[in-house]
Image (cartoon, rainbow, N blue to C red):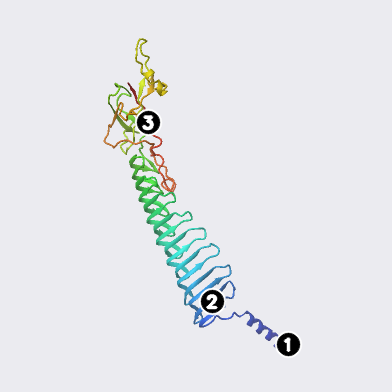
Amino acid sequence: MAAAGRGSRGSLQRRRESPRPPPRDGYGVYTYPNSFFQYEGEWKGGKKHGHGKLLFKDGSYYEGEFVDGEIMGRGCQHLTWSGNTYSGQFVLGEPQGHGVMTYGAGGRYEGELCRGLREGQGVLVDPDGQVYQGSFHDNKRHGWGQMLFRSGDEYEGDWIRDGRQGHGVLRFADGSTYKGQWHSDVFSGLGSLAHCSGVTYCGLWINGHPAAPATRIAILGPEVLEVARGSAFTLRVQLQRDNGETADCESGRVLRISAGVRHVQPPALSEISFFKADEGHGEKPFETPFGFRCLSYPLACPTSLRPGPRAAVERADTNSPLSQGEPGPALDSGAAHGQGDTPGHLRGDSPLETRMESLL
């Protein structure tokens, strides 16, 4: 009797430990032995097949199509640990094909995926609202694509592993445009930058900066010209680098000229004095680098709009007129730092200024 009793308890324990088999066919709810998974939906031959919902104990879930026990077809997946939600095509439990991924950290992707990673053509909106449309590989921007930065800058061209590399065009929000080669997300190689101020640099770029920028406007000829009041005069200038060589790669800069009236004490018996006639304007003589004092004198008369002494500026080379600014781009979206971009060293707000004293 004792032996029979022990056998009966053993059979009861085995029955308690044996998992309940899943439903065979039709609709049913099944909790798996480890209790982390629960499935509710259609069954066929003891396998999940048709439409159903797979719940995870941490709150994650998948709802959609199943084939022979596998997640296959169209469905929606939410992962609690990342906050990501994906809706689209699945193959063997992974997002694959076309779908929409909404990221818990912000941003959204719509396009092609492979094994859960961005692969192929798609549109990615990052948490800052910047938009990339183009090719992806291994979850990164790779191939040809377009990007609109939050600064308003737009890039169109080649990408390699999330960086601009190859050939591309960057259109800045201020109207400036760079066309040429890129490497590691900065201007590198041959390219041209047409700045909104009118300055143009066309040539070699190294690490985001012009390889041979102009640093000064040199005057070819005497620095001091003495001309009669109301007469025309001509200047010949040239863009040069630090070593004195001509900066052929750059054009579009503007030459700023200062004209003045030489401060000369008139004879004691003279009845006419320019300085006495100009006292009403409140101008005071200023020192010049040329060893004499001058009074400011406009090159165009603001009252009559008739020109005073005129300056005809000619280049010693064949480039177009020069524009004001310092050479060398410093990019912010991207050319130098990778996100929204704006050229800084070719701006027209810090002119290369040449002072000419017109002695009238």
Q: Which of marks 1 and 2 is in front?
A: 2
Q: Residue at x 52, y 77 (%)?
A: 41
Q: In which quarter of the image is residue 176?
A: top left
The residue type indicated by label 3 comes to Glu
Look at mark 3 in the image and give the residue it sits on.
353
Q: Where is residue 118 in the image (x, y as percent from the top left)?
A: 43, 61
Q: Separation of disc 3 and disc 1 at Cα?
A: 113 Å
Residue denoted by label 1 = 2
Looking at the rendered structure, the number of numbered marks drawn on it comes to 3
Instruction: Out of 338 and 356, give the one closest to the viewer.
Output: 356
| Vertical comparison of 230 with 350: above or below | above
User: Residue lying furthest bottom in this view?
Assistant: 1
**What is the three-letter code of the residue carrying label 2?**
Glu
Tell me the crowding category of disc 3: few under 14, some 14 to 19, or many 20 or more residues within 10 angstroms, Cα based: some
Distance CA(mark 1)–CA(mark 2): 45 Å
Which type of secondary structure does the marked residue at label 3 adopt?
loop
Apparent side of residue 91 relative to residue 247 in the rendered image (left or right): right
Dot 2 or dot 3, earlier in sequence:
2
Q: Is mark 1 on a helix, strand or loop?
A: helix
Locate residue 201: give its quadrant: top left
Which residue was labeled with disc 2? 40
Q: Please, which residue is most extreme toward the top here?
A: 269
Write the residue at 53% across / 62% down: 83
Q: How crowded is mark 2: few (under 14 residues within 10 Å), some or many (20 or more)?
A: some
Give whichever of 20, 330 is nearer the camera: 330
